[in-house]
Image (cartoon, grey):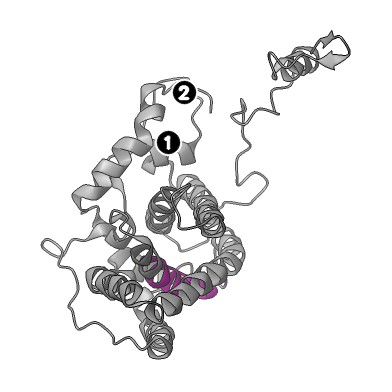
């Protein structure tokens, strides 16, 4: 920066940063730096004995994809929430889930490198980013609840309540995983998910007991999203395998606990449990098998476009 008649010249507010970079040769101050450490650096990622590496990797993709896709949907609320407090809360929730996704995708790649998409030789893209930005929709293993396009605010609170209630119960048990990496991820995630569930639960009650219009919107959202809920608690063969090996959790075993929590929220809110069956799959295949709604492909097209346009870029 230069001085002009005793005042700072703000014609280029970034001059100081550029000068510092040139002198120090350090680009770490930039929002999009030139390097990020391996999120699992220093952690023993050896697959536990008697655990199938491919199953462990797929299981991590399931949990990681749930978080990644849900995070993106919540991030779409940035600057669009009803007020600033909720805008910040939803953005922070999205960041929590994005952090979980990064760790879980990195764990998947460390367990079985074959799950990582092949990129151009010399690409600087780390494994977890390759999994996020260079897989097609059919390669994602998230539940379909996470990918449904956003509706109104009530829709988002209902989805977050269903998602976080089930995920919190799962992470509480995942802390006991034989895989120390999953155990550590779960231990951190429990604190985050407790807040997510409570935040959504409070808003569920507020909307249910608010105006006639807020209640109408809440009930409409619950009716629309309820068929997606059972997929969170339905056991996939991979989940059964990793649960038997002591590294994962069988989601079907969480059903009673999760239902009790939801019934408590419904009861205090004066809302009845929807009488709708689960969303059907195709020949038994669901989101866990890579069968998704069109919404996921559209979301990924937006989310992945920059990375795919610049596969040799540093982010």
227 or 310: nearer the eye? Answer: 227
**Disc on the earlier residue, 1 or 2:** 2
Magenta part of the chain: 159-175
Give the answer, above or below, for where 230 lies relative to 186.
below
**Is 208 placed left or right of 40 in the picture?**
left
Quarter of the rendering containing residue 10: top right
Q: Position of residue 80 (x, y in %)?
A: 43, 50
155 or 10: nearer the eye? Answer: 10
Quarter of the rendering containing residue 188: bottom right
- Is 165 within the magenta? yes
Q: Residue furthest left?
A: 283
**Is 226 placed left or right of 160 in the picture?**
left
Residue at 23%, 74% (x, y): give it.
Answer: 223
Q: Main secondary structure of the magenta part?
A: helix
Residue at 15%, 67% (x, y): give it.
Answer: 280
Give the answer, above or below, for where 170 lies relative to 79.
below
Q: Does residue 176 show up?
A: yes
Q: Residue furthest right?
A: 6
Q: Position of residue 138 (x, y in %)?
A: 24, 46
Q: Are the residues at dot 1 and dot 2 in contact (C-beta closer than 8 Å)?
A: yes
Q: Position of residue 104 (x, y in %)?
A: 49, 53
Callout 2: 10 Å neighbours few (<14), some, many (20+)? some
Residue at mark 1: 130
**Is 119 placed left or right of 169 in the picture?**
left
Residue at mark 2: 123
- Is 25 within the magenta? no
Q: Does residue 134 show up?
A: no
16 or 173: nearer the eye? Answer: 16
Residue at 41%, 78% (x, y): give it.
Answer: 210
Residue at 36%, 27% (x, y): give it.
Answer: 308
Callout 1: 10 Å neighbours few (<14), some, many (20+)? many
User: SS for tag 2?
Assistant: loop
């Amino acid at each position: 920066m230069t001085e002009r008649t005793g005042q700072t010249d703000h014609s280029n507010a970034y001059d100081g940063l550029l000068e510092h970079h040139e002198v120090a040769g350090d680009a770490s101050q930039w929002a999009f730096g030139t390097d990020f450490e391996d999120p699992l650096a220093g952690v023993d990622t050896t697959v536990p004995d008697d655990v199938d590496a491919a199953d462990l990797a797929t299981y991590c993709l399931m949990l990681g994809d749930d978080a990644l896709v849900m995070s993106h949907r919540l991030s779409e609320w940035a600057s669009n929430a009803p007020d600033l407090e909720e805008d910040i809360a939803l953005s922070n929730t999205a960041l929590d889930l994005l952090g979980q996704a990064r760790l879980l995708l990195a764990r998947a790649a460390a367990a079985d490198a074959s799950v990582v998409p092949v990129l151009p030789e010399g690409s600087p893209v780390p494994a977890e980013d390759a999994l996020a930005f260079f897989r097609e929709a059919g390669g994602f293993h998230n539940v379909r609840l996470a990918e449904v396009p956003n509706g109104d605010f009530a829709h988002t609170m209902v989805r977050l309540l269903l998602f976080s209630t089930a995920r919190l119960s799962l992470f509480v048990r995942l802390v006991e995983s034989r895989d120390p990496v999953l155990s550590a991820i779960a231990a951190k995630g429990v604190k985050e998910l407790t807040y997510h569930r409570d935040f959504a639960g409070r808003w569920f009650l507020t909307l249910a007991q608010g105006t006639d219009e807020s209640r109408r919107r809440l009930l409409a959202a619950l009716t629309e999203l309820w068929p997606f809920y059972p997929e969170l608690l339905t056991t996939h063969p991979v989940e059964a395998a990793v649960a038997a090996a002591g590294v994962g959790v069988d989601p079907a075993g969480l059903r009673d606990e999760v239902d009790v929590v939801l019934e408590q929220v419904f009861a205090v809110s004066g809302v009845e449990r929807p009488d709708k069956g689960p969303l059907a799959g195709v020949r038994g295949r669901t989101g866990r098998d890579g069968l998704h709604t069109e919404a996921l492909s559209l979301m990924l097209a937006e989310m992945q476009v920059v990375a795919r346009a610049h596969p040799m870029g540093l982010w």
